[in-house]
Image (cartoon, rainbow, N blue to C red):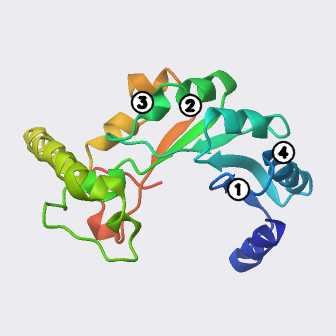
Amino acid sequence: MRREVEQSLSALGIDHIDLYQIHWPDPRTPLADTAAALGDMIREGLIRHAGVSNFDVEEMREFGETLPVETLQPPYHLFERDIETDVLPYCAERGIGVLAYGPLAHGLLGGAFDEYTTFPADDWRSAGPDFTGETFRRNLAVVGPLREFARRKGATVGSSPWRGCSPRRRWTRRWTRRSSARAGTPTSRRAPARWTWS
């Protein structure tokens, strides 16, 4: 991990990383060891803040016994809201910032897919349960009415999910004040018109 941090610093031409997040828990490495290594790099000034991604409450609790978790980056969208039950309340109680990823359901809510959409073999969605078989058809059946609803509101399906993942919404605000949603697009041309750039 240290080598990766040092390589990133060198490649970017910077002397520190503001936020370094562990993308997945490593089953081969105790979480306490990972947290301790990050703590060392914070004390050395290589990174300023440490967070985690795709951790559940128990994993955050275990990590937090060695180093406080400052941010969590979980998947969160219309079709995947499990974190509302225990993860978001846990983060709110401890002041952990939440940076949701996939608010457009990895393209499902972008409005460009239909029942004929296929994905290349090297695209993880080609085998993802939300993008194959009956589940894919069921998800698309939800997007159709959303598209019509968004059209009536003068919006697009791609811009509508931001309201649900935005920290300004009541059901997100009650859990944490430090939250945001993260999405990607291959080009700025494909970004919904209502997105603001920061």
Sequence-wise, the earlier of marks 4 and 3 is 4
The percent coordinates of residue 174 (x first, y second) are: 49, 20
Q: Is residue 72 left or right of residue 125?
A: right
Q: Which mark is residue 158?
A: none
In the picture of the structure, the residue carrying the numbered disc 3 is 168
- Mark 1 vs mark 2: in front: 1
How far, Cα to Cα, is label 1 from label 3?
33 Å
Sequence-wise, the earlier of marks 1 and 3 is 1
In the picture of the structure, the residue carrying the numbered disc 4 is 32
Which amino acid type is shown beneath numbered disc 1? Asp
Closer to us: 159 or 113: 113
Q: How crowded is mark 2: few (under 14 residues within 10 Å), some or many (20 or more)?
A: some
In the picture of the structure, the residue carrying the numbered disc 1 is 26
The percent coordinates of residue 98 (x first, y second) are: 56, 39
Sequence-wise, the earlier of marks 1 and 2 is 1
Please name the residue shown 38% across and 40% down the image.
80
Which amino acid type is shown beneath numbered disc 3? Arg
Which element is circle 1 on? loop
Q: Can residue 48 be seen in this view?
A: yes
How far, Cα to Cα, is label 1 from label 4?
11 Å
Q: Residues within 10 Å of mark 3 (few under 14, many from 20)?
A: some
In the picture of the structure, the residue carrying the numbered disc 2 is 87
Which amino acid type is shown beneath numbered disc 4? Ala
Tag 4 and tag 3, C-beta contact below 8 Å: no
- Mark 4 vs mark 3: in front: 4
Sequence-wise, the earlier of marks 3 and 2 is 2
Q: Is residue 51 left or right of residue 137?
A: right
**Looking at the figure, which quarter contains the N terminus?**
bottom right
Which amino acid type is shown beneath numbered disc 2? Val
Please name the residue shown 54% across and 29% down the image.
88
How far, Cα to Cα, is label 1 from label 2?
19 Å
How far, Cα to Cα, is label 4 from label 2?
20 Å
